Image: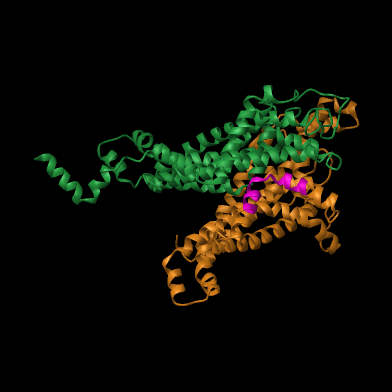
């Protein structure tokens, strides 16, 4: 188990380094000089035309050095907790991100838990009642969840539930420990939208793998021993049937946190996803650089946890 | 003498009896299995409809999708404009009809780019030494773990200044949606390599290239076609997401995601402006998925040759 954990950890570190190199290079390749943008924001236009001023700014931001050196500087600065400043809006990235990452994480974790519970339950239900009405209904819902764009579902909810029926607030976000009631009311729609895709995929995977297990010999033996349905399902079917569902969860986490860009934009939630989109629209490269890296970091970390859990649940993995 | 003997054997052995049956027509069987489920028929019909609309958009759409009618902005659905008009007085129905072109092209091109990359890498991984293979597959796992939307946003943003319009989005999507193919092809190669005909080919001195092109690729085509169909829907959805965020296909192009973005500002007064294009996206993605499902059933080798 220990060697398995160490291998996974090294692997996660490798991914983070790979992603940061990729993100950094991609952003350096972007057209448009960040210094130009910075200067064009400057009020003192006269001073800005001075080439010496350019050169000073360039070395101030470390942009006069070759790209690999820039990367190493940037990377080690981040390790020390210096994430740099926004070019456009001048805020300190780390401070801004601290409040935003809490928002994105709390919404994402809630969506993830809900998608697992609901998805697995629906999957079990439609597998053991195969061909019945429940199965048909669940299959239709899962199909909608896979094929409808998240922003479209969000638009529908905002229009019908928020605007027409006035049941829930249209947008915004409040932290749960500030005002729990408002927070819950504001979170219902975004969490539903974020969780719908993962629910559908988890449900489909659970259904098909449980159906496979239901046909296996040990399940038939369990039935013929005269066990109750509950015992057969919980003790003999789920243990094997849910393995592929656990493997799928890594992708689901990527989906939830990647999708936060869309969901946070449409519900005007001050999280990381919205920060990333705003940064890209205003070409605020330092922000984009850090936020994309942080979002990936969250996903890699979550994947690591899933992998470790998988190794813990399935004893075969440890000896791979 | 010979003939009577043969007939006698045919009566005795089941194997010969089966051989005397009329051969199963593979194409007919394919069609029958494919159209067995109603949802697949619906999905197929819808895909055909969308292709039809895309080809004949010039003839059947009531208005020019880019023509602004500033005397007639934000019109509610009426006899002249069945779905109403947008903030610039453009006919919504016509824009949705022209949107089929962008959706179809984005889907096909993205899938082609990503499939070529993915299949090539997957084949290399499948035939490489085990160490190289491990490295490739681990990198693939890593790519799958990264939220693809983030990479797509970055790439689309980067490519926008090099390739205008649809091109940047298509390339960005194509360059991020290939890891799935690598996994699939690699798994296929590993299974197919075990087959006797590959061994026979090797024993006869076939080169690796011949084995790949002659034996592996043709047998891996079925799952590949199924996956490509499914990925058409996925890439259309991804494009719509990018365009909705304002980082995909730029206005005034009649792309569905872009139309949702523009229409969303007027959600409270004219909900159709954003709901209708979104519905079109869902219909097309659903249809592709259903066709993919049908193809999977029809191409399943375990069912091949069966009379059903």
Question: Which one is nearer the viewer's eye here, A278 or B92?
Answer: B92
Position in image of residue A253 (x %, y %):
64, 54
Whole-percent x, y for residue A55 in the image: 78, 30
Query: In screen coordinates, is A96 left or right of B198?
Result: right
Name the image quarter holding residue A204: bottom right
Res B239 quadrant in image: top right
- The vertical placement of A305 against B305, above or below, is below
* Magenta part, dominant SS: helix
What is the letter of the orange chain? A
Residue drawn at (59%, 41%), measured in percent from left and top?
A: B42
Residue A38 on image: x %, y %: 82, 33
Between A97 and A136, the one lying in front of the other is A136
**Chain with colour green in the figure:** B
Q: Nearer the viewer, residue B18 or A241?
A: B18
Left/right of residue A167 with respect to residue B233 in the rendered view: right
Magenta stretch holds residue A145: yes
State which quarter of the image contains the C terminus of chain A. Answer: bottom left
| View extreme (left): residue | B1
Residue B114 as seen in the image, left or right of residue B209: right
Q: Is residue A47 visible?
A: yes
Above or below, A15 relative to A24: below
Residue located at (78% from left, 41% from top): A278
**In the rendered image, which quarter is residue B218 located in?**
top left
Q: Which residues are magenta?
A: A140-156
Q: Is residue A23 visible?
A: no
User: Residue A177: x and y, percent?
Assistant: 83, 64
Residue A288 is inside the magenta segment: no
């Amino acid at each position: 188990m220990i060697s398995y954990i160490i291998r996974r950890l090294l692997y996660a570190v490798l991914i983070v380094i790979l992603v940061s190199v990729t993100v950094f290079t991609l952003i350096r390749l972007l057209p448009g000089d960040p210094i130009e943008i910075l200067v064009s924001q400057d009020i003192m236009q006269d001073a800005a035309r001075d080439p010496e001023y350019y050169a000073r700014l360039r070395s101030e931001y470390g942009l006069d050095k070759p790209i690999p050196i820039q990367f190493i500087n940037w990377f080690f600065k981040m390790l020390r907790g210096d994430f740099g400043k926004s070019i456009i809006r001048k805020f300190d990235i780390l401070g801004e991100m601290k409040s935003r990452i809490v928002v994105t994480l709390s919404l994402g974790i809630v969506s993830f838990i809900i998608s697992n519970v609901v998805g697995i339950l629906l999957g079990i239900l439609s597998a053991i009642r195969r061909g019945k009405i429940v199965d048909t209904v669940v299959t239709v819902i899962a199909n909608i969840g896979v094929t409808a764009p998240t922003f479209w579902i969000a638009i529908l909810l905002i229009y019908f539930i928020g605007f027409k029926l006035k049941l829930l607030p249209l947008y915004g976000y409040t932290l749960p420990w500030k005002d729990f009631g408002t927070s819950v009311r504001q979170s219902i729609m975004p969490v539903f939208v974020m969780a719908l895709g993962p629910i559908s995929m988890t449900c489909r995977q659970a259904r098909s793998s449980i159906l496979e297990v239901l046909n296996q010999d040990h399940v038939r033996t369990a039935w013929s021993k005269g066990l109750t349905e509950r015992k057969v399902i919980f003790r003999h079917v789920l243990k094997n049937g849910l393995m592929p569902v656990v493997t799928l969860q890594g992708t689901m986490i990527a989906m939830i946190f990647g999708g936060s860009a869309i969901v946070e934009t449409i519900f005007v939630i001050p999280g990381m996803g919205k920060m990333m989109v705003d940064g890209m629209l205003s070409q605020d490269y330092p922000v984009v650089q850090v936020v994309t890296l942080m979002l990936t970091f969250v996903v890699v970390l979550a994947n690591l946890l899933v992998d470790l859990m998988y190794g813990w649940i399935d004893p075969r993995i440890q000896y791979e | 003498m010979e003939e009577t003997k043969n007939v006698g054997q045919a009566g005795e052995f089941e194997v010969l009896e089966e051989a005397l049956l009329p051969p199963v027509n593979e194409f007919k069987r394919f069609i029958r299995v494919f159209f067995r489920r109603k949802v697949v028929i619906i999905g197929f019909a819808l895909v055909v409809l969308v292709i039809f609309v895309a080809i004949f958009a010039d003839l059947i759409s009531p208005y020019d999708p880019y023509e602004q009618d500033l005397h007639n902005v934000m019109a509610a659905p009426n006899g002249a404009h069945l779905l109403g008009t947008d903030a610039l007085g453009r006919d919504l129905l016509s824009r949705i009809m022209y949107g089929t072109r962008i959706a179809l092209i984005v889907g096909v091109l993205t899938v082609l780019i990503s499939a070529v990359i993915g299949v090539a890498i997957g084949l290399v991984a499948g035939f490489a030494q085990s160490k190289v293979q491990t490295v490739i597959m681990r990198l693939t796992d890593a790519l799958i773990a990264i939220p693809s939307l983030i990479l797509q946003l970055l790439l689309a943003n980067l490519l926008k200044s090099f390739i205008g319009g649809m091109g940047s989005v298509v390339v960005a999507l194509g360059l991020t949606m290939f890891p799935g193919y690598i996994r699939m092809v690699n798994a296929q190669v590993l299974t197919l390599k075990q087959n006797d005909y590959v061994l026979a080919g090797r024993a006869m001195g076939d080169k690796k290239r011949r084995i790949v092109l002659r034996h592996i690729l043709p047998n891996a085509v079925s799952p590949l076609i199924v996956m490509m169909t499914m990925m058409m829907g996925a890439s259309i959805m991804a494009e719509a997401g990018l365009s909705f965020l304002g980082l995909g296909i730029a206005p005034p192009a009649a792309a569905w995601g872009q139309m949702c973005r523009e229409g969303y500002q007027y959600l409270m007064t004219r909900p159709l402006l954003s709901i209708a294009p979104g519905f079109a996206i869902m219909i097309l993605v659903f249809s592709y998925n259903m066709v993919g499902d049908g193809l999977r059933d029809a191409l399943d080798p375990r069912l091949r040759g069966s009379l059903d």
